[in-house]
Image (cartoon, rainbow, N blue to C red):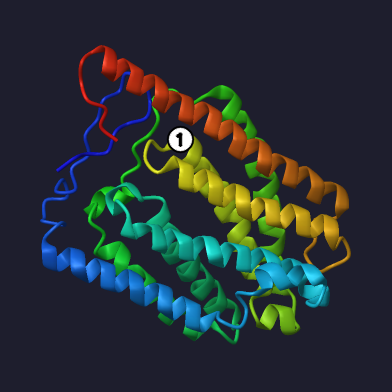
Amino acid sequence: MSGVRDPTPHQPIVMNSMSSGTDTNTPIRRYAFYVAVVVAIAVVGITLGQFLPHIILGWTGSLGNRSIFGLVTMAGAWTALLGMAVQFYRPIERVNAILLLPTITVLSGVIGFATGTVFATLTLVVAAIALVPLVLHPAGRSVLRFDRVRSPNRLLVGLWVVGAIFLIVYGGQELLKQFTLTGEDALRGHYGDLAIWAFAIAVWGGLAVFRRRDWRFAAWISGFVALYLGVSSAVFPDASSSLGSVSGLLIAIWAITFVATTERVRGGQIEESGATEKSRGRPKNI
């Protein structure tokens, strides 16, 4: 079985999906994993079916004061579904992708239950279904093992820190609203879900910077959702939970810069690693 190549130069590493001590790659378990992925995608698709088009329709202003919530959370929902869909291709390498949907739904369900939102029970059921593919994942317990980059690029780290601080502050404000405000938005968990996605951008951005495996998915989904938050805030500065025109524009610029810098830095490390392996007469193992 081929392992997962460490993209950091001069750090050959082979990750074996059997390292958890149990056979995580038997045919029955693998088939069960794929079935669980299909079920998770279908359940989320059915649950959010009428809201998923908001990722495009929300730009028309039809959502009114809830434009930020509709655009950002549906952008996040599509990325979470993508994280499940990519499991059909080399799932052992998609360790950051498989974590997204279970993490988001569990947090949404827990916060919703704690604040008494109308969708809390349903969200917890969806979370339980989303956890099944994670449990059955071919990579086993190594999905949760943090394989850290040996020498993170300082520029990339600094860029991530700037965005992460801003997003954590924003997420904290939204979370406080969820626990303190009343009204329909709080009852539907709008503030809590925005807080979760703000935190998710920061966390998955960190995974793109510091984790060896599956960095590209983490970079692009964090950049994509951050871009939606920024642009929607700039377009709808007076909507609820908007960052405002200036801050929205700044976070949008940050999102684009972060993805581009991550691609340049981490992608360059892969190319350098491949050249090193070739010069040594050893096949590149990704």
Tell me if residue 237 comes above or below residue 43 in the rendering. above
Disc 1 marks a residue whose amino acid type is: Phe
Residue, x 42% and y 54% (percent of image)? 97
Tell me if residue 267 comes above or below residue 24 in the rendering. above
Residue 270 image position (x, y, % from top left)? 40, 27
How many marks can you see?
1
Tell me if residue 20 comes above or below residue 188 in the rendering. above
Q: In front: 130, or 189?
A: 130
Left or right: residue 122 versus residue 191 is left
Residue, x 24% and y 52% (percent of image)? 139
Q: In front: 160, or 272?
A: 272
Q: What secondary structure is found at the residue carrying circle 1?
A: helix
Is residue 173 something that shows in the picture? yes
Q: In front: 199, or 228?
A: 228
Quadrant of the image containing the N terminus: top left
Residue 244 image position (x, y, % from top left)? 85, 55
- Quadrant for residue 6, please give it: top left
Residue 52 image position (x, y, % from top left)? 60, 74
Tell me if residue 119 comes above or below residue 177 in the rendering. below
Left or right: residue 9 versus residue 24 is right
Residue, x 67% and y 50% (percent of image)? 167
Q: In front: 280, or 250?
A: 280
Left or right: residue 76 versus residue 56 is left
Residue 256 image position (x, y, % from top left)? 67, 41
Residue found at the very far top of the displayed protein: 279
Quadrant of the image containing the C terminus: top left
User: Mark 1: few, some, or many residues within 10 Å (few <14, many ≥20)?
Assistant: many
Is residue 129 something that shows in the picture? no
- Quadrant for residue 280, please give it: top left
Which residue was labeled with disc 1?
210
Residue, x 61% and y 35% (percent of image)? 260
